[in-house]
Amino acid sequence: MAGGAQRSPANAGAAGPDDSLTRTVGRRIFLKVLGSAAPAAAAAACAPLPAEQIIPYVVPPEDVVPGVAAWYATVCGECPAGCGMLVRTREGRAVKVEGNPEHPLNRGALCIRGQAALQGLYNPDRFDGPRRRRRPGGDGPGDGLLEPVAWPQAQQLLVERLQAAREGDEPGRIAVVTPLLTGTLDRLVARWAAAVGARRLRYEPFAHEALRAASRAAFGLDAVPRYDFARPDLVVSFGADFLETWLSPVEHGRAFAAGRRRGGGLRTRLVQLEPRQSLTGAQADEWLALEPGTEGLVAAAMVHTIIAERRVLLPRAELGAAARLFELVRDHAPEQVTGRTGVPAAVIRSLARRFADPAAGGGRTLAVGGGVAAGGAVATAAQTMVHLLNHVAGNTGATVAFDAGDGPAGAGSWGGGATYRDLRALAADMAAGAVDVLLLHDVNPVHALPDGAGFAAAVAGVPTVVSTAACPDETAALADLVLPAHTPLEAWGDAEPAGGVRGLQQPAQRPLHDTRHLGDILLDAGRALGGEVAAALPPEGDFAALLRGEWQAAHAAAGGGGDFETFWADAQRRGGAFEPARAAAVALRRAVLEAPLELDPGRGERPFMLVAYPSAHLYDGRGANRAWLQEVPDPLLKTTWSSWAELAPETARVLGAEDGQLLHIESDHGAVDATLLVNPHLRPGVVAIPLGQGHTAYGRYASGRGVNAAALLDPRPEEAGGGPRWLGTPVDVAPRAVRRPVPRLQTTFDQDGRGIARAVTLEELAAGGPPAAAEPAFSLYPDHAHPEHRWGMAIDLDTCTGCNACVAACYAENNVPVLGADRMRRGRTMAWLRIERFVEDGPAGPDNRFVPMLCQHCDHAPCESVCPTYATYHTDEGLNAQIYNRCVGTRYCANNCPYKVRRFNWFEPEFPAPLDRQLNPDVTTRTVGVMEKCTFCVQRIREGQDRAQDAGRAPRDGEITPACAQTCAAEAIVFGDLNDPASRVSRLAADRRAYRVLESLNTRPAVSYLRKVRRA
Amino acid sequence: MTAERSDAMSLGATTDDVLRTLGRPGGAYAAAVVGLLAVLAVAAAAYARQVGTGLGVAGYQPPILWGVYITNFVFWIGITHSGTLISAVLFLFRARWRTGVARASEAMTVFAIMTGALFPIIHLGRPWVFYWLMPYPNARELWVNFRSPIIWDLFAIMTYLTVSVVFLYVGLLPDIATARDRIRDWRRHVYRVLALGWSGSDREWHHYRSLYGLLAALAVPLAVSVHSVVSWDFATTLLPGWHSTIFGPYFVAGAIFSGVAMMITLLAPMRTLLGLERYMQIRHFDNLGKLLLVLSLVMTYAYGMEFFVAWYSGNPFEQGAYWARLTGPYAPLTWTMLACNSAVPLVLIARRVRTYLPALFAVAILVNVGMWLERYVIVVSSLAREFDPANWTGLYYPTWVEWAITAGSFALFGLLFLLFVKLFPPIAMHEIKEQAEAA
């Protein structure tokens, strides 16, 4: 590896040796060498192919043992949360990513977007090298297409343009837009930008502007708090989708599940108020569909109740603040806000009483507000009110805490980010010709910003647009110069996403294409510019050396004892350096109590209100070119490869529109046509459209799919916070006489009383639990013997959130092919694991139940007896095995499977290069015409058994985990040996909540489900 | 038709009449053969596409993993029952009216098995390894799973095919010998080989009679078993709508029903086209009509029982499946099927309908349609509404590939039948003569 730093695998004893050979000689080449040495001469003589020069492994890399995986610890770059990641590499190729168990944020878990990071690396549409646009007036044809250019020329071009832009006296003619980077790269970009006189924006479409503005107003910190979801007994969420996209979903998911699992009746109660039920809202015990944008009014009414009923939980010194606060909310008694919010006064009052309960003490509850679903016209005021609500309930400093400032502007990765208003200002300057060079790294504002912001048009006013996009996107499509940067899995870096957390990002493999590190692009350009720019940058060494240098300096500054090499190797192995977070002492600012807050967003002229919500899979749209994220069905509506517009059934009826019909949706700013999906969990009068689709130039998987709700959005920034208005744009909706149904993998959420997804109330549990179902024991066949192990699984429906991370993990681990929209329209998914969603009527809103459904590895498997060729059979470890090359494809097994978990290869599976490099070499790829299904990750079982055998012991409980269980943030999936009565899975299978799906069929599944716990 | 009785017929005239049908084919015959070959070519192209691309070119919509191919398989195997029933059962009961139609029905049996047996292979994901379904000694030391009803199917169908072919061939022997002696073109070489040196000695006739009787006695239980085994493909699964003890007799009755209907469908035109009015008389059709009527009543009873048992079981899965059959997305097909199989055949109560060939032919066609739909409904609608509502998604409808292959199966069956009637005496001459002598 060039540069000053070497990677170190997480599973190596110490820092690894130079492994550069691995990067050049991959498995295929290695096998070619092995296999083709002898016939090579003969082949060269008669084959029309040119003779290839082949070089044998003279010196094998010490790091690489063929057939043994090397794991590298790194940082996930899929969103700003900065989770720790381990990358499994085989013979130099990254084949799987998993959460880093040592990382304090995610502790081994990853979300679906993290799992799909591999498809960013291996995306078949990536730039394979730098590109220059052929402009009219240049030396080549002026057809406006991108042409390849070599790196030296590309760097030279960049330097020339930068030089030209710096020649005038006016500073700021260069603009650099990056995502919310943290750590060394962030500091380098800042230094570089300052040195070249560039303005620099740390831009995220979801930048939580309102929440940061509210924190500034209430506590004087431009920061997003850290929320504790594990401790509170009651969580009130005003539209925060904290389990999907909001802030740090994996961290929240882990904590929330821990809170629900406490036992002894302490299960966290979640109350969610939002106009459209999110996946987070689907976990709620009480779900209230409020009028969009009126979150602040409900929070104010809760504050009103708490103060009026003397339930304030503040230290004595601060009690005076309560009186002033009451003045602020005087006109917001529950009765006064009911009409506007649509939430009954009694409900608000009861919620307030539970929220601040002097008998229980302070710090036992948590209110969170935000997510883009609460990004309306008065978002900052609403967020401020949520802060105040937490404050009067004594939660500030307890369940709501601010990290003491290591980060750029106080805390975490969110502080100091550019607001949407900043982007608009930049766009205005660009349109006015005040920007000469625009350098964009890993951002796609052309797609993500509201069309009305005019960013795309403004780019035309910039003479030189430089993009470092790894994949083509809408913004790179406007660039004059494309200098593709490494994807996060190929790059060095570090991340400081939260206080005390410094994640170290190691490249998991050698760059796939002719790309460079952003740091190196900037360093080289800066040095070439010379003068004060070069002086401001380190004189030599690449970015990797700079990174190592910074860590060394930090190690020295911290007075860290011991040798730096040891520390560095340890950080590489562990994925960073982690310390407990220090909380900042915060006090409520007086000023916030003095200025009145306008909490009513008002209503527009048009009859409907738009809610543009973030997609749990695609985030702001960056996930749209990852085929897994498109293929895995939406967690709530089970749609794939599409976007749509949701209306409540009442609204659809009034409009005379039917499911699958095309709707014409028009705002003052634009219009789109989208397919109607009727969603009963939506406030009437609201049109909800997911964000993230509607790409035009984002590669084969994303382009031309669905609509981009950004076309409709009100482009004005929210007054106080400067964020975009994702919610509340007034729209007209007219059904069109065209049907264009979207592909969906589940169309009914009614389980028809069949007991697939079961629940139990807390009261029933307290009274001894549900009656155990009598298991039918009769069988004509002798039982299977399981002399050593019987592998089994237990899935807790109470903590499963239906987030789909396990589904993507299964795709990655087991080489499950992606089929695309047309084949999904026929329901031909290949997923070995799916999440079924069922909705029952609950006492306070819908009762959503998510059932991960996979092969149940039945002891009396109906599939086994009908297979004519023994392609499926029962192993002596209790697995229901499938032998692909013995299968003739009668599909009889799948017909006889009551769980419908067997998948048939209707076509030859396709893995367009280089996605084929992601394939797990431990798992056979299947061919056309054979059946496949979940194996309980038999390759991981074997690996665990081999490891145990090498150590001369039996596998330990919990040592072997299938990919689905491994990535689950909620730890809802537990795998183990049912033969061992002490194993976790055995104990869970005997739990009072345990049942087996379709038990009455006497299939005797190895998978037990634990009933969801609900409130009576 | 004036000469209702065959007493007056001279033996020679019978031979002449029958062998005349083996004469040079006319234009209509050639056109029919070309047309069927064209359909078969389209089917072959569709099948080539299916093998080359994968079964995905068919319309399967999981969880509906079986469709038209299995429907066709059950349908064609059902058709086979005409032959055994008409020929063997009536032979054993000494029902003399069978003579005119026995040969054609035996041939139909053989061709329907040949057509139907293709479908389990067409339906395979990897048809090129279909022989793995057969237990044969192999170097991989692999064996088939005898618990699988597909293996039972294989044995039942192969046995049935073998016995049916032998039964047809043995019945043909004396007539082939006659043809050998009378026909002078290239076919005589074929007949010479096939006649096995038949000379018509007493000894040969003696052996012939005992063998034919034995085979008839063997064919009848086989016919019952083969469709029972086919029904077990469904009945031994867990699936609501399939898992039912009624399926054995229900499928056998249905098979005979569809077989008789197919016989009428083929014999009515053949009678006119080949000028065999003297041998296939209206009273034969009258009898077939009565048979069809009785079987229709049996089927109606079976349908009633199927629904009753589902309701009476109290099993929500069963009830859901059958309720969906009557009211769900496939309900129009269910009701069409009930109309064709239970309502329409009731017109056969009237003797005038039974003896008026166009009407009888129309009823038979509708029964054919109804029985095909019955299999479609059983296969598809049960799979569409099984245990877990999460899987109740889209509608299965066949693609052009499946329609082409289905049409191809009818073309193949028709073609084989057409070739047969030009190559072999379509009526058992020796039996007619024997009866005439006895009379």
Image (tube, rainbow, N blue to C red):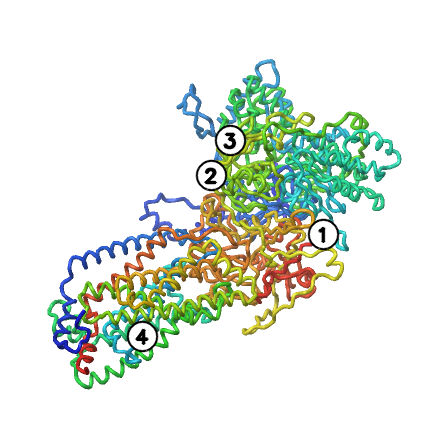
Dot 1 falls on a residue whose secondary structure is: loop
Residue A41 bears which disc, if any?
none
* Residue carrying label 3: A474
Q: Residue furthest left?
A: B184
Q: Chain of mark 4?
A: B
- How much space separates mark 3 and mark 4, taking CA atoms? 71 Å
- Mark 4 or 2: the one toward you: 4
* Residue carrying label 4: B163
Q: Nearer the viewer, residue A526 or B407?
A: B407
Image position, residue A204 (x, y; %): 62, 32
- Mark 3 or 4: the one toward you: 4
- Mark 3 or 1: the one toward you: 1
Instruction: Tell me the kind of residue under disc 3.
Output: Glu
Above or below, B1 against A242 in this view is below
**Is residue B95 at all visible to an observer of this figure?**
yes
- How much space separates mark 2 and mark 3, taking CA atoms? 13 Å
Q: Are marks 4 and 1 in contact (CB under 8 Å)?
A: no
Q: Residue furthest right?
A: A316
Q: Locate residue A394 relative to residue A808 in the image: left or right.
A: right
Q: Locate residue A748 relative to residue B109 in the image: left or right.
A: right
Q: Chain of mark 2?
A: A
Q: Residue furthest top?
A: A169
Dot 4 falls on a residue whose secondary structure is: helix
Instruction: Tell me the kind of residue under disc 4.
Output: Val
- When asked about the image quadrant of residue B110, the answer is bottom left
